[in-house]
Amino acid sequence: MSDYDKWEAQQLQRSGLVGSKENPYYDEEAGGLMPSQEAEEDVEIEVVDDEPLFLRGQTTRAGMQLSPVKIVANPDGSLARAAATAQSLAKERRDVRQAQEAAILDSIPKDMSRPWEDPNPQPGERTIAQALQGYEMPEWKKLYLGKNVSFGIKSTLSIAEQRRSLPIFKLKDQLLKAITENQVLVVIGETGSGKTTQMTQYMAEAGFVSPGRLIGCTQPRRVAAMSVAKRVAEEFGCRLGQEVGYSIRFEDCTSPDTIIKYMTDGLLLREALVDPRLQRYSVVMLDEAHERTISTDVLFGLLKECCRQRPDFKLIVTSATLDAEKFSNYFFNSSIFTIPGRTFPVEILYTKEPETDYVEAALITVLQIHLCEPPGDILLFLTGQEEIDTTCQTLHERMQRLESANPPPLIILPVYSALPSEVQTMIFDPAPPGCRKCVVATNIAEASLTIDGIYFVIDPGFAKVKMYNPKSGMDALTVAPISQANARQRAGRAGRTGPGKCYRLYTEAAYRCEMLPTAVPEIQRTNLENTVLLLKAMGVNDLLNFDFMDPPPVQTLINSLETLFELGALDDEGLLTKLGRKMAEFPMEPQLSKMLLTSVDLKCSDEIITIVAMLSVQNVFYRPKDRQALADQKKSGFHQPEGDHITYLELYRAWQRNRFSNAWCYENFIQLSNALPQHGQCCFKAASLDAVLGGGGRRAVEQITGEKEKIGGEMEGEDRGEDRGRNGGPGLVLREAHNTTLRLCFIGFFRHACRVDPQEGYRTLVDHQQVFMHPSSALYNRAIEVDAVPSCSFSVCLEPQPFPLHNTMPQDESCTAVSLLLL
């Protein structure tokens, strides 16, 4: 019997599917299992400490110290203390809200709650209307975000009149002349000046498009690429996808007639992998370059080289901030073209003393402005969805308590990326006469959105920032002070319609001494494994001398190279292996692509593709603020004892059994209907395997398509996922498949292996970092039991200390041995 067979038999016995006498380790003479040390003797653990030859003397094994990049000018200052206090206050508010939701859940009659407990109710038990009785949208959301709500009067100008009213229109001829005379042009323009929508059209009308080529415009966000393309197509007088189209990950809305193409910066980077000189493009416009995403920073270096090799190529770099000199110096001292915005003077007001609770200070400031200042809308910057919804709820309640004083109406509108687009667009509608609008937004409103009518800006001075810790190999999403450049950008939002005011909820000393001049670029503070793999695939082997505008930390680059070596993507000389080249073809993290490629050998690629697709979706389970307790109850019904990855797999299969129904997703608080539509699934699976494995992807898609066609037939009477897990023989097959799938997941994330800490939580095997299971994990309830999950591995850790783990899976000692060998 092989070691794997022994391991599998032990797993089956632990799960209760087979008896102890059926275990090959059962000793009839002793009347029990063989001593555990005999089994341990079968596993030899050899810890490999050898460094890769190309990194010898530069890794942590050689004593290299790893630490995250500092994004705070003064870690002991008032802003840093306020950020830490805000997190504890947010937890207190969350605990109070969860207690209220638990009380509501306990009050639900049992006969009514049953459909919510069962994630797969039988036909006839699906009672959407009954399930929603008594659980309505909160009053403040119903009042401001209801389906039939409309504010003010929308613009009556025609499209042509709207285009002529933009600041860029008066400079059209000068702009086209500057583009003609310069190969690289840096364009500085305020948000709302028209540079994103108009410049591509001006160039197309002026004949900058060569036959068979395109004008490409990159955006840092998928939503921006789609929405801008839709608007430009409307102005250009064509259907979206004809002369004007867009391309984003797994979705291409272009045609052979397309001459203006909007896309994410990551997609253009992927195109450069196949065509480094970008021969398809006459002009490339890097829009919103000041956001400095990883993809944009890498494109800087690649497009700079493209300009050297192609004299006919035009590059335009646009920014909404005043960092033009830096861009110009980097791009061959190129010319700078400035589009004057509609700006008015803005009065800056600071607090006299530091604020410990900036959310409470912001609420007080909003009410003071509303009750004491002249007409004009308010823009309040906060850090995220939870903070915004809590603030809007509290603000609405306080306005209700002021009704006896008969204050003017205040329209409260939240803005964050998770809101539906039709709700987000409501912020652009003007407030009715006699009313004031208060927009509560994340930093998306700094430059990506243009909201007219804003006269008052409230800036607490914080934003959520993603940070990578090379020592632990984990990302942390933390609240941190913004930069001085961000603060100026926020203040400028108050001066677009008329003279305005900006209330900074921090002292002037904090602005000058505790904020960095500019934000730390993403490439200097995030994981670079995927970026390094992509550059290696492009033939860039000397990463330390690559022409970055702001080079990433050497320690982060070395850590990424070491990880890629351990995954088998690089050889001892640091060159790309055959496996690494295949991994680079996938638009995903190297750990996920390694899982996909290995799954072909173990003949479970369909399961791994599904898991990878689910891991690529943010917030598969959603928790409406008005029904969080019920949503949690629904989610728990899907939890699998094998962890979150198998939970995602079985969730997809349940969706499949229900004919990919949107109604089923709605009932179960699942966001698959929009994030992973049926067409997107087929495209994803075809693109994932077919691109690198020839017919493997086609076979997978054929299998999936065949299963979908059979949904109305045999799958109606066969509950494939559930029945196989409940009955004897088929249950064994399902359990074996789950174990194989878990092994593959572990192959990708072996560096994230953990063992239970005798004191509390878990500790990672890599650096002995203490971590904890996040309550949203399928293993959370098992983990709080003594020794129920002695060791595990995780995919994501996206929060600051105490480092809660997301997407976790259990592992036994044999997997732990594998992790030690690989480390």
Image (spheres, rainbow, N blue to C red):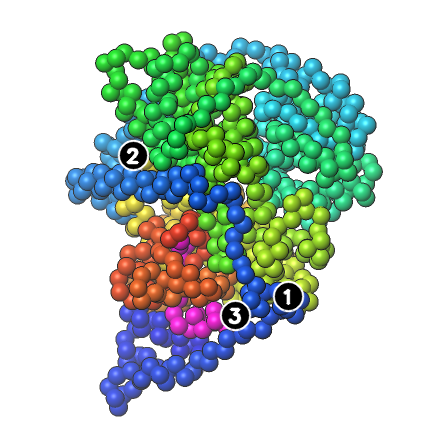
Callout 1: helix, strand or loop? helix
C-beta proximity under 8 Å, tags 3 and 2: no
Residue holding disc 2 = 626
Callout 3: helix, strand or loop? helix
Instruction: Give the residue type at disc 2.
Output: Asp
Q: What is the tally of numbered marks visible in this picture?
A: 3
Q: Does residue 601 lie above or below 315 as drawn?
A: below
Of circles 3 and 2, the one toward us is 3
Question: How dense is the environment of label 1, judged by Cα within 10 Å: few (below 14), some, or many (20 and up)?
Answer: some
Quadrant in which the N terminus appears: bottom left
- Tell me the residue at 28%/56% (across/down): 781
Q: Which segment is the magenta one?
A: 803-823
722 with respect to 820 (left or right): left
- Tell me the residue at 71%/45% (across/down): 302
Q: Does residue 527 lie above or below 304 as drawn?
A: below
Residue 13 location (% of width, % of height):
31, 73
Residue at the top extreme of this rendering: 433
Q: Upstream in the sequence, badge 2 or badge 1?
A: 1
597 with respect to 383 (left or right): right
Q: Is residue 260 visible?
A: no
Residue holding disc 3 = 822
Between 364 and 591, the residue placed more toward the observer is 364
- Tell me the residue at 44%/53% (across/down): 797
Residue at the right extreme of this rendering: 311
Q: Is residue 295 visible?
A: yes
Q: Upstream in the sequence, badge 3 or badge 1?
A: 1
Alpha carbon of mark 3 to alpha carbon of mark 2: how far?
46 Å
Residue holding disc 1 = 55
Q: Quadrant of residue 266?
A: top right
Callout 2: helix, strand or loop? loop
Instruction: Give the residue type at disc 1.
Output: Leu
Of circles 3 and 1, the one toward us is 1
